[in-house]
Image (tube, helix red, strand yellow):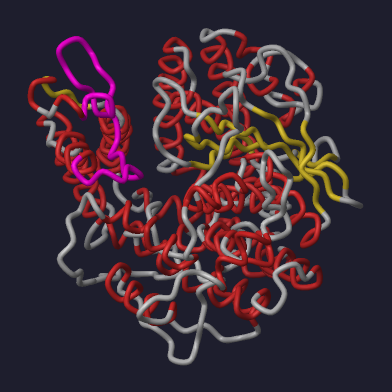
């Protein structure tokens, strides 16, 4: 049975269709792919239930997971990013259909019995390799948090709640990206040009956080975040549904259920105090803080941070740290969903092709204003074919399009976000796991952000920046801008004093005496900063940076050590063990 050949086989990558999947030349192809995946699922469920206890059981479960994820993950991306509404709607139907099947499988008693038969046999477990044992335990964990221990009636109720959550999640996601409107007459006429127009209305589709005009930021904040009664009701119902599910399967709250498999284990509550600052000012002033740290005017540094230069910088960094190159590869007709999407082959100097990254970087109509990493296909070893299934991911940003006179120029915040998302992508590429269930970023949430946050440190280190920052017109290197770091206009206080105050006021982070991280320290801004997992990941990333890279951010030995100890395992090893292996320190939370 050719499990790896159902979708994304080696020959498929040479075919037309989204991501090289021949069925996906049109929206109707999603139904074809879904039908094939579900038929394959039926066969694999029989196989998993009939296996003799051993590694074959784990492999069957992973094949089952892989077959569903290859369709569901692809659809999960297409439903939010494809410019064609027909593709988006077809992908959404696939997500719901496969999601429903997954929830039923998570409460399938016969499947669970097969896995339990393996894990209850100490002699068999002792013969399993560490990865297989870990994956078996993770699959059992999925059964447990889904309510496998409940009676038939309550299990059906749990599945129904899961299915309801799938619908609520979709409804909320769609609503959260919808713009809000206000009558043109309601705001000053001279500000109309800052917003999109729709007849007699002004349409606000974002916070305009980068605008230097505080009134524009305030108007955008008040209008864009004005409560929508339908979405508010959806969110309230979603939270109630999550709570009901958690209580039904035996947890104190949904937070307790969600965090059980993380480094934190149980919910943590993060408090912070802020000085008097309007909420619409925070994202903008974060950028101002960055400029104050560098003491450079935006007009000075932006021409040095073209998208092309930053991508060249990432390529050089990965080459020096891991021996990995990012090589542009022309996509075939129908393979990408927009003409400005770029395909990168990730190639190791001795190991060869590691996987593919699709770069969907530019703003377009109906595209969410969010920076995201999507796993399209996870890597795994295919025992059936004797080949490694290469990972495929998408990086989605919302960068401004280039103009006739200039390429896309990035702000420091945009550059940090680019490096952040590329950190996720390289985790997916370098996590060469045996099992798809733990490939790359498929690990504990509060560990998954560590590689991406660590990349922010590289993005703000002058030794890294000076390797690639060149003026897009003159080719002049960044020395002139670096000079500004040391020869800026005098201030009434030191940059360390500014850093100390801003850390305390903006981020609630304690300042460490006798340190000066101005050129190296990465900020808690924007993306995910309010979530505990991001904060925990930042703490771990800080440890890794100080332990491995602060002295030399381009050190190959440290790059290899970091790859082998933390990136290569994906989720196949306990996060704390990976951190301790890399830093040689016992971690206590």
Depicted 514 relative to depicted 25: above or below: below
Q: Is residue 162 left or right of residue 471?
A: left
Which residue is nearer to you in this view: 140 or 508? 508
Farthest residue to the bottom: give it: 514
- Residue 203 is a magenta residue: yes
Residue 233 pos. (x, y %):
12, 34
Image quadrant where one finds the N terminus: top right
Residue 57 pos. (x, y %):
65, 48
Query: Image quadrant of residue 308?
Result: top right
Query: Image quadrant of residue 478?
Result: bottom right
Which residue is nearer to you in this view: 585 or 575? 585
Residue 125 in view, yes or no: yes
> Where does the magenta region start and end?
191-215
Which residue is nearer to you in this view: 7 or 227? 227
Depicted 486 relative to depicted 128: above or below: below
Residue found 42% across the figure and 26% down from its top? 367
Residue 120 in view, yes or no: no
- Residue 519 is a magenta residue: no
Residue found 63% across the figure and 57% down from its top? 570
Residue 182 pos. (x, y %):
13, 24
Query: Image quadrant of residue 501?
Result: bottom left
Depicted 107 relative to depicted 544: above or below: above
Residue found 24% across the figure and 28% down from its top? 204
Image quadrant where one finds the C terminus: bottom left
Residue 343 pos. (x, y %):
70, 30
């Amino acid at each position: 049975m050719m499990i790896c050949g159902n979708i994304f086989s080696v020959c498929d990558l040479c075919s037309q269709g989204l991501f090289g999947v021949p069925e996906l030349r049109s929206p109707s192809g999603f139904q074809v792919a879904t039908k094939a995946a579900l038929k394959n699922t039926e066969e694999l469920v029989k196989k998993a239930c009939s296996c003799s206890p051993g590694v074959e059981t784990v492999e069957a479960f992973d094949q089952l997971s892989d077959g569903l994820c290859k369709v569901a993950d692809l659809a999960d991306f297409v439903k939010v990013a494809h410019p064609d509404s027909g593709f988006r709607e077809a992908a959404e139907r696939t997500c719901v259909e496969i999601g429903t099947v997954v929830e039923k499988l998570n409460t399938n008693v016969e499947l669970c019995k097969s896995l339990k038969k393996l894990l209850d046999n100490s002699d068999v477990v002792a013969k399993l390799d560490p990865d297989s044992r870990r994956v078996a335990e993770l699959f059992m964990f999925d059964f447990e948090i889904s309510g496998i221990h409940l009676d038939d009636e309550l299990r059906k109720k749990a599945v129904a709640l899961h299915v309801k959550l799938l619908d609520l999640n979709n409804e909320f996601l769609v609503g959260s990206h919808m713009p809000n409107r206000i009558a043109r007459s309601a705001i000053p006429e001279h500000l109309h040009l800052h917003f999109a127009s729709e007849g007699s209305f002004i349409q606000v589709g974002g916070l305009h956080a980068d605008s230097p005009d505080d009134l524009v930021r305030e108007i955008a904040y008040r209008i864009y975040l004005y409560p929508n009664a339908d979405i508010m009701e959806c969110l309230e119902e979603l939270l109630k549904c999550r709570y009901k599910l958690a209580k039904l399967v035996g947890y104190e709250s949904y937070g307790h259920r969600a965090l059980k498999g993380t480094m934190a284990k149980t919910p943590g509550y993060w408090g912070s105090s802020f000085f008097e600052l309007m909420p619409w000012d925070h994202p903008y002033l974060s950028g101002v803080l960055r400029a104050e740290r560098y003491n450079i005017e935006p007009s000075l540094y932006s021409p040095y941070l073209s998208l092309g230069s930053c991508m060249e910088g990432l390529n050089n960094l990965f080459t020096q740290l891991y021996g990995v190159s990012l090589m542009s590869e022309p996509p075939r007709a129908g393979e990408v969903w927009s003409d400005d999407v770029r395909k990168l082959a990730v190639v190791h100097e001795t190991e060869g092709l590691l996987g593919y990254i699709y770069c969907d970087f530019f703003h377009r109509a109906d595209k969410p204003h969010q920076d995201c990493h999507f796993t399209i296909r996870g890597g795994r070893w295919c025992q059936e074919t004797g080949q490694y299934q290469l990972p495929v991911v998408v990086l989605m940003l919302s960068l401004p399009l280039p103009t006739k006179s200039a390429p896309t120029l990035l702000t420091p915040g945009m550059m940090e976000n680019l490096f952040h998302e590329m950190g996720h992508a390289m985790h997916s590429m370098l996590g060469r796991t045996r099992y798809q269930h733990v490939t790359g970023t498929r690990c504990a949430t509060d560990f998954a952000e560590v590689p991406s946050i660590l990349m922010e440190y590289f993005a703000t280190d002058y030794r890294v920046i000076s390797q690639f920052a060149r003026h897009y017109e003159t080719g002049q290197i960044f020395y002139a801008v670096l000079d500004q770091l040391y020869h800026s206009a005098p201030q009434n206080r030191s940059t360390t004093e500014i850093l100390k105050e801003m850390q305390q006021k903006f981020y609630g982070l304690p300042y460490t005496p006798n340190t000066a991280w101005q050129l190296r320290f990465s900020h808690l801004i924007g993306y995910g900063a309010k979530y505990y997992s991001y904060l925990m990941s930042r703490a771990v990333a800080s440890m890794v940076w100080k332990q491995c890279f602060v002295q030399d951010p381009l050190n190959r030995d440290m790059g290899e050590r970091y790859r082998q100890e933390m990136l290569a395992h994906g989720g196949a090893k306990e996060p704390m063990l990976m951190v301790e292996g890399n830093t040689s320190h016992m971690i206590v939370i």
